[in-house]
Structures are given as structure tokens and as C-alpha cells.
Image (cartoon, rainbow, N blue to C red):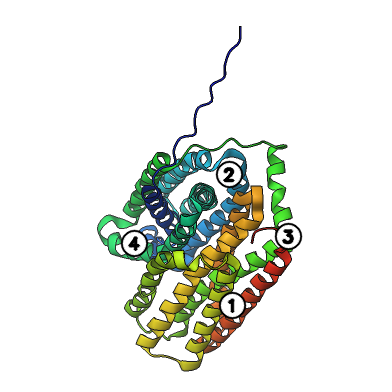
Amino acid sequence: MSTATLSRPAPAAPAFAPTLTVFILTALLVSGQLYVVIPLLPDMAVGWHTDPGALTWLVTAFAIGYAIGFLLFGPLSDRLGRRRLLMIGMPLAAVATALVAISSDPGVAIALRLVQGVAVATFPPAGMAYLGESVEPRRRVVAISAITGAFLASAVLLQVAGQLLVGSVGWRGLFVLSAIGLALAWLGLRAVMSPDRPREQRGSLMATYRVVPSLLANPALALRYLAVLVLLGGFVAVYTGLQLSGVVTSSGELLGLRAGGLPSILLIPLLTPWLARLSAPVRATVFLLLAAFTLAVTGATGPGAVGLALLLALYVAAITAGLPALNESIASLAESSRGTALALFSFFLAVGSSLGPLAAAAFSRFDLLMYGLAGVMIVGALAVLVSTRLAAGGRRV
């Protein structure tokens, strides 16, 4: 007696538009958890009878957990699968966020923010790797650009949301809303993501993490990670410098300059079908040089409010287009370790975010900061150029 083994056909991939919509909203909410607490600090300080400055650890703890999570979950997503990891990580993120809302003192809240950062860090590496593998090539650049833009836009949108809502729902209510949002994001991802493909299990779980040093030891990848660090570190440094230098005199004007970059963030994904005609390393180099040029002009001209807004919009456009190009160029070198490589991409984004304020504080004048950052952007462009030479040899870059 013989038995025939019937193989089930692979399920059809979900429609592109619903998938991208869910991923964009999830990216806004996940990345925005870093920023949403900033406008809440005064209210939290009043409730806990402490100084708002002491509560900045609520931001730092989340950033530390976020960076650690990238390194932890990138290799796991390669081993376990993108969807499976997110089906575990997103509910944990919702629970950790809800627990912050009921925390009894700052120490507990800081510890929970660390846990929250680790949990939400499941999404960027697994989500980006999923899009890179599942979206058809002609739409892939659009998808990656849109998600990268959402990560950048969250810095503005979630701070604005926190500032507008804290008066009506309180800071605890905002964390409850965030927890509900993360739970809904989990359900949305569950609905639109295709089942994970079978994955070959090689070696022990610890062996999964041994790929991290090998990726960092790859000279071409290491140079591209340097460019990632430069690009986002400069982005954070510019806006921190605006606040520290006194160039902007009111919080409303600063908020307006931040919001002025949103049109660029929205526009770049629409232009990616044309931008994608250039290879990813070429795009990354061009936009790093454009960022350098914009910063140098800002430093040299000392523009007024309108001129500064226009130059910052162009600068944000360069960042928004440069980051997905670097993402794509890194993924192209990672082969079977795409999730781990993109986890390192996200890790260097987080490190750049933490170094940006230190860079801004190191310069006493805004124009000098602009010149310094312009020079760093040029170094990043040169790093991408050299990495392309090193990656040559038949491998697609």
C-alpha cells in the first residue's frame, strides 16, 4: 500500500496596498514610542513630584532596549521566520506599553521602557526583511522608502500627538492608547502577512548570532553601516542644534520647521519608481552628497526662517531617499542573512540617533555644526563609493 503526499500550494500574497498600509502605520507607532514620551515629561514629573530632567532616562532606556532588540531579533527572524517573530513580539510590546501606563514610580517606568524598547524592536528588522523578500521587485523600493519615511515622520507626528492629547487623556492615557494601537497593529500584521517560508535550521541557536561578527567583518558592509550612522546621526544633530543654538526662538517655530519636512517624507516614496533606475549605492552616494551640499549652504548663508525651512525640506528629502538606498544596498550583500544585516542597519540607526545630540552639543555655533555635519556626510558618501568597489566581483550591489 502506498500513500501519496500532497503538497499544498503556497498561499497567494496579500494585496500590496493593504500590506503597505499596515506596515506604515505599524512603523509610525513602533518608532514613535521613542518620541511620544518627550512632550509628556512635564506632566509625568508633576505626578511623581520629581524634576523633568531626571525623567529623560525614560527616553534613553527605550533607546537602549531598542538597539539591543535589533541585534537580538534580527538573527532570530532569519531562523524563526518574519511573521512568527512578529506574532510573538507585537503582543509583548502591547503588554509592556500598558504596564508603563500603570507604573507606580519612575524607576519602574524606566525599567518597563527598556522592556518596551526591546519588544517593539521585533518589527523593524523582521518587517523590513519581510518586505524585501515578499514584495515584487518593481514595488520593493517604494515599500522600503515608505517604511523608512514612516520611521522618520514618527519623530514629528508622535510628539505632536502627545502634545495635543496629554491635556485630555493624561500621560497614562497616552500609554494606554499606544498599547491599544500596538495590539491593533499585531492583528493587522497577522491579517496581511503571508505564512513564513520553510527555513533550513543550521547549528544551534547561538550559532545564529555568530553571523553578526562576520557581517561586521565584511569591509563593504562595514562601510555602508558607517554611512547609515552618519546619515541619521546628522538628521538628529541638525534638529537638536536648532533647539540648542538659539537660532529658533520659539517652540512653535521649531515645531513648524520639523513639520516642514513632512512633505519631503511623503513625496520621496512617490518618486522612487524613477529613482530606482539608479542602483542603490549610486542613489545613496548622490543623496549623501546632496545632504552635505544643503548643510554647507545653510551654514554659509545663515538663511532666514523661510530660507531655513526650504533648505531643511531639501535636507530631509535627501535623508528620506538616502536611507532606503542604504537599506537596499546592505540587503543585497547579506544573502541568506538578510534579517541580521537589516537588524544591524536598524542598530546603527539607533546609535546614530543617540550620537546626534552629542554632536550638536559639541559645537557652540550653528553654522559650525552645519559645516562639520557637511564634512561627515561627504565621508559617508566616500564610504559608499569604496564599498561598491570592494563588493565588485559578480555579486549584485
Dot 1 amino acid type: Met
Res. 344 visible in picture: no
Q: How many marks?
A: 4
Q: Quadrant of the N terminus?
A: top right
**59 or 252, which lies in front?**
252
In percent of width and height, residue 269 lies at 42, 64
Looking at the image, is mark 3 or mark 4 earlier in the sequence?
4
Dot 2 amino acid type: Ser
Which residue matches tag 2? Answer: 77
Report the Cα–Cα distance between label 3 and label 2: 21 Å
Question: Is the C-beta separation of discs 1 and 3 under 8 Å?
Answer: no
Looking at the image, is mark 1 or mark 3 earlier in the sequence?
3
Report the Cα–Cα distance between label 1 and label 2: 31 Å
Which residue is pictured at 74% across the width and 59% down the height? 217
Label 2 vs label 4, nearer the camera: 2
Density class for disc 1 (Cα within 10 Å; few <14, some 14-19, many ≥20) is many
Which residue matches tag 3? Answer: 218
Looking at the image, is mark 2 or mark 4 earlier in the sequence?
2
Which residue matches tag 4? Answer: 162
Report the Cα–Cα distance between label 1 and label 3: 22 Å
Q: Quadrant of residue 41?
A: bottom left
Report the Cα–Cα distance between label 2 and label 4: 32 Å
